[in-house]
Amino acid sequence: MEAASRPKPKIQRLPPLPPAEKNHHRERKRIHVICFAIFVILPFFNILRFDVPNQRFYFAGAEIAINEFAIAFFALMFLMFVIAAGAIIYGRIYCSYLCPQMIFSEWSMLVERWAKKRTKYPRLVFHAVLGVASVFLAFVFTAYFVEPRDLFQRLIRFDIVTAGGITGAVVTVLTYLDFTLLRQKFCTAVCPYGYLQGMLQDKNSLLVHYKDNQEAPVCIECKKCVRVCEMGIDIRNSPYQIECVHCGDCIDACEDVMRRIGRPGLIHYSWGEQEQAIKQEPWYMRWGFRDAKRVAILLILLFYAAGLSLALSMRKPVAIQLAPDRTSLYTALPDGRYANKMRVKLANRTSKPSAVRIWTESLPGAEVANLPANPLQLAAGQTIETNFEIRAPRTPQSRDVNRFRVLVQAEGTAGAQSFDMTFIMPVAAKEK
Ligand code: SF4
Ligand code: SF4
């Protein structure tokens, strides 16, 4: 219903209510500060970083190669489900409380208001502050994809020639334009999460809901809820407006106004359009677990989280692939021994150098030969692929196909990795 067509309110004064228990705006600002600190810390401590030049994914301090399928799969599925579950259960709470775009948009508006009130050259001060902030924010953002120390070197050299330098410069310009011109318009015009939200929402998703008495409305038409809304909407028209990011500022505004005439606010967080306000419900309902669908979502999330933890706990610092090279079955050596060819691929997934030793078991007199070195030295992040030979003499116990094991151990790991192999040599009558 449009605000203009509402019946005139009859106001009955009641004793004033006690002070508000919660101020959503203040709480949101506190969370914004925490989110900003997390945004800055994550790439610098490799808690979450996707190093494009080195094709490495850093997660919780672990260095993961892009080709580590199980970890990449569980990490992506887990993050996808977190986003989907967040949207289904909590609506656009992420947008208003956690999204860097919203945090910096609101912050840039704050700077603009402050410059207008407190300085002599407001436009100049505003653009100067935003310019410096854009360089810093673009640096932190680019550090999610390029090693931070390397990026800093490029920044102080004003590098706009290499891919990393160009990326940093482009992100700085985009950040500056975003926070001086676009701001919250980004949320409704560009952001895919805003659109996705509309599709995922259902009758139990969290909403900001205006509810007045139909017969005797008490809304005093002060429009404070409209004035405080940074997204420029009137929540009284509908709780399903795509612009609404569920920030709760209109809830605070209305409570503040209505409190003065001794009435509770008319705008609440609610699950769907139900009348009951959140604070009147049992705790599990308040946490959003209101139907079987939400419990299923939680279980799927737990499944992917468990899969991710398991894959992380099982990952090896050096990936080892070993296979026989059967282009020839065996080679007879001048000293009477026989040689079988092998191929080994080693990938050091850590940020430290490593050494890998290869030896055999259960093949009498056998030795590993033709390796560049044993142990093989691997630099941080290096992958080596090389051929080598297993050489062994014939003994009274030898057969044409001899089962044995190749053991490979990387420096610093508790045990060796064992590979069951066969060693082929001719029986005496067929010897070539
Ligand atoms: S309508 Fe209210 S909750 Fe929605 S964006 Fe505006 S102030 Fe925030
Ligand atoms: S702040 Fe509350 S009382 Fe004022 S117009 Fe909005 S809903 Fe009505």
Image (cartoon, rainbow, N blue to C red):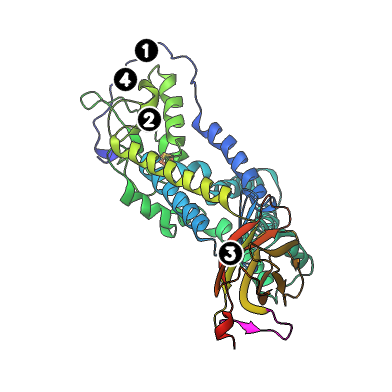
Query: Disc 2 or disc 1, which is closer to the eye?
Result: 2
Residue 11 disc label: 4
- For the stretch drawn in magenta, the main secondary structure is loop
Task: Name the residue beneath numbered marker 2.
Answer: 268
Foreground of the two, 368 or 338: 338
* Residue span colored magenta: 328-337
Q: CA distance from mark 2 to mark 1?
A: 20 Å
**Residue at horizontal 43%, vertical 14%?**
17
Q: CA distance from mark 4 to mark 1?
A: 9 Å
Label 1 sits on what residue type? Leu
Dot 2 or dot 3, earlier in sequence: 3
The location of residue 407, given as percent across then percent down, is: 65, 61
Task: Name the residue beneath numbered marker 3.
Answer: 174
Task: Name the residue beneath numbered marker 1.
Answer: 14
Query: Disc 4 or disc 2, which is closer to the eye?
Result: 2
- Ligand 2, image quadrant it occupies: top left
Q: Is residue 254 placed above or below 431 in the rendered structure?
A: above
Element carrying mark 3: helix
The location of residue 413, given as percent across then percent down, is: 69, 52
Q: In the figure, is residue 361 to the left or right of 242?
A: right
Which residue reaches farthest top? 15
Query: Disc 4 or disc 3, which is closer to the eye?
Result: 3
